[in-house]
Image (cartoon, helix red, strand yellow):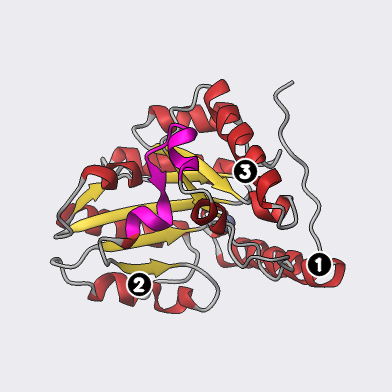
């Protein structure tokens, strides 16, 4: 079968097969796990169109495949009804943080923002256990490279926010194969999944909004991402429309 990039039904068939062969965990469960044999982690970074994340969540629930979905606090992503429904389908919902980006590299301000945003998840009823840093394409960085440097600077922040961990750091100790749907890696995604032996852990990262029903729709959302990256270069910054609880 020839599998096409960013087509929803194709990735669901692949995931269904993987589910039948491996042991699936949510990212927070890695905290107390010590085997990497047969291990399968499915992570979604929800960057926009949360309704597509919900579509994945429902489909995966049908095949008993728990996944972990990381949501931004951006207004078009942080939709409590959708997040709660995903959580109710036995998936984990966490925070896709970009606090250093939003505070232009001011670590102390980013630390405060992080705590405030984690509590925002709890206020709407999300049982948040882990967070995962976002990488904004071509956004100029001021004194840091990655948003997760916030956790490296303040390692106690995870405990202080009553969390179990940060996805990148939790995954690291299992030395898994990382298969992801980013622009260049998408072309090897299916091969990488197929070729990972069962004694090796497998970590699949998908950006839910790119996975659509047909090629034109998928391309539209991929081109939109490239345009945002281009705007980040041109403006040297990005504007955020954020969810506000009050
Ligand atoms: Zn992201």
Specify the segment rendered in magenta: 156-171
How far from the left and from the top, in percent, is residue 69?
46, 44
Dot 1 surroundings within 10 Å: few (below 14), some, or many (20 or more)? some
Helix, strand or loop at mark 1: helix
| Residue name at image x 17 percent, y 53 percent | 20
| Residue name at image x 37 percent, y 39 percent | 164
Asked whether 149 falls inside the magenta stretch, the response is no
Q: Is mark 2 within 8 Å of ligand 1?
A: no
Residue highlighted by disc 3: 111
Give above or below for 200 relative to 184: above
Helix, strand or loop at mark 2: helix
How far from the left and from the top, in percent, is residue 94?
48, 40
Question: Disc 1 vs disc 2: Cβ atoms closer than 8 Å?
Answer: no
Residue highlighted by disc 2: 190
Give above or below for 125 relative to 235: above
Dot 2 surroundings within 10 Å: few (below 14), some, or many (20 or more)? many
């Amino acid at each position: 079968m020839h599998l096409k990039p960013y087509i929803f039904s194709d990735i669901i068939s692949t995931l269904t097969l993987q589910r039948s062969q491996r042991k699936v965990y949510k990212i927070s469960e890695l905290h107390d796990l010590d085997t990497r044999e047969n291990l399968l982690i499915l992570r979604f970074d929800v960057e926009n169109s949360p309704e597509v994340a919900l579509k994945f969540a429902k489909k995966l629930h049908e095949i008993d495949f728990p996944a972990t979905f990381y949501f931004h606090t951006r207004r078009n992503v942080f939709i409590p009804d959708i997040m709660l429904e995903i959580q109710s389908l036995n998936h984990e919902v966490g925070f896709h943080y970009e606090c250093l980006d939003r505070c232009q590299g001011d670590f102390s301000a980013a630390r405060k923002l992080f705590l405030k945003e984690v509590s925002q998840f709890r206020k709407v009823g999300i049982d948040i256990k882990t967070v995962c840093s976002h990488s904004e394409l071509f956004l100029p960085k001021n004194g840091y490279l990655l948003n997760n440097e916030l956790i490296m600077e303040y390692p106690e922040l995870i405990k202080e926010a009553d969390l179990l961990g940060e996805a990148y750091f939790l995954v690291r100790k299992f030395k898994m194969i990382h298969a992801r749907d980013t622009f260049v890696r998408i072309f090897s995604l299916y091969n990488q999944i197929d070729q990972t032996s069962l004694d090796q852990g497998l970590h699949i990262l998908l950006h839910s909004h790119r996975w659509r029903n047909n090629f034109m729709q998928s391309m539209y959302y991929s081109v939109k991402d490239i345009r945002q990256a281009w705007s980040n270069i041109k403006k040297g910054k990005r504007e955020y429309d954020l969810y506000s609880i009050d």
